[in-house]
Image (spheres, rainbow, N blue to C red):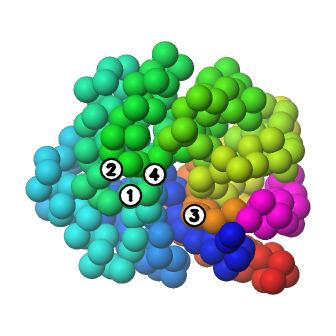
Amino acid sequence: MADSPKDWHLGVALWTFHTFSFVDALAKVDSSGLKYIEPNTFQKVGGELQDSSVMQLSSSGIAKLKDIATQKGLVIRSIYVSGGKTREAWIKDFELAKQLGVNYVTAEPATDMWDVVDSLAGIYNIKVAIHDHWKGVSAYWSPDSVLAAIKNHPHFGACADLGHWPKSGINPVEALRKLEGHIIGVHLKDIAAYNNPRLKDVPVGTGIVDFPKVFAELKRQHFSGCIYIERDAEDQPSNLQSVIQTVKYYNNQVGKLK
């Protein structure tokens, strides 16, 4: 059983720096002092790989991508994949994930692809963390719909996006309770109000999400895995300062649980 929160790994979802290339985003993660990252397949790589997106990379390009992260001492535990509507598209994503050596992919597979994606996840031995966007945008806006996907699909779990649930009027703590035993990863995010999908997120600890209760619930569940800071908003000149602020807030709150 996990000795949480010691077994939690704080990191950054690279969508936080989506206006920058992968290479430039890593420099910002490095400045935050964090070690774990969740890249995505649609970000441009930059550097010698220039404008190629991650999903467009050849096998040698993927190896270079991993090497760039390793040289900075960063660890890729998961990757957000766009998936697709065909088995071939998912095979390409799983091949990329396998080469990067991730534990799981974060995704929102089409509902008619569940069996295909679960089968491939078993073949590749890589879990699928179902991610939630908000009502009207995602089939997975409710924890009930995530549970429906997980049922009879043993390689599925949940990526709990704490800032997206309130946009659909869902209390994040109650959602976490519903998903107990299935949470693979967490996107650490805050929001200013409930039931307003037009809102961009705010720095963690400044909105309506009750993070002391969130962390207590994750501890109660003996959660063990990555908690990725993620920003959708585009602070200027970047989201780096809010990430650093979130690291301090997280350490303060989690320190109280020990």
Occupied quadrant, residue 2: bottom right
Q: Which secondary structure class fits the magenta region best?
A: helix
Residue 102: image tag: 1
Q: Which residue is mark 2?
A: 97
Foreground of the two, 91 or 195: 91
Whether residue 140 sits left or right of residue 125 in the image: it is right
Magenta stretch holds residue 154: no
Q: Which residue is mark 4?
A: 104
Measure the alpha-carbon separation of dots 1 and 2. 6 Å
Q: Amino acid at mark 4?
A: Tyr
Range of magenta residues: 207-222
Occupied quadrant, residue 250: bottom right
Residue drawn at x 51%, y 57% is 13
Measure the alpha-carbon separation of dots 1 and 4. 6 Å
**Residue 192 coordinates in the image, percent (x, y):** 81, 48
Q: Which residue is mark 3?
A: 226
Whether residue 218 sits left or right of residue 130 in the image: it is right
Sequence-first disc among 3 and 4? 4
Determine the secondary structure under disc 3: strand
- Quarter of the image containing the N terminus? bottom right
Q: Amino acid at mark 1?
A: Val
Measure the alpha-carbon separation of dots 1 and 3. 12 Å
Measure the alpha-carbon separation of dots 2 and 3. 16 Å
Q: Amino acid at mark 2?
A: Ala
Determine the secondary structure under disc 2: helix
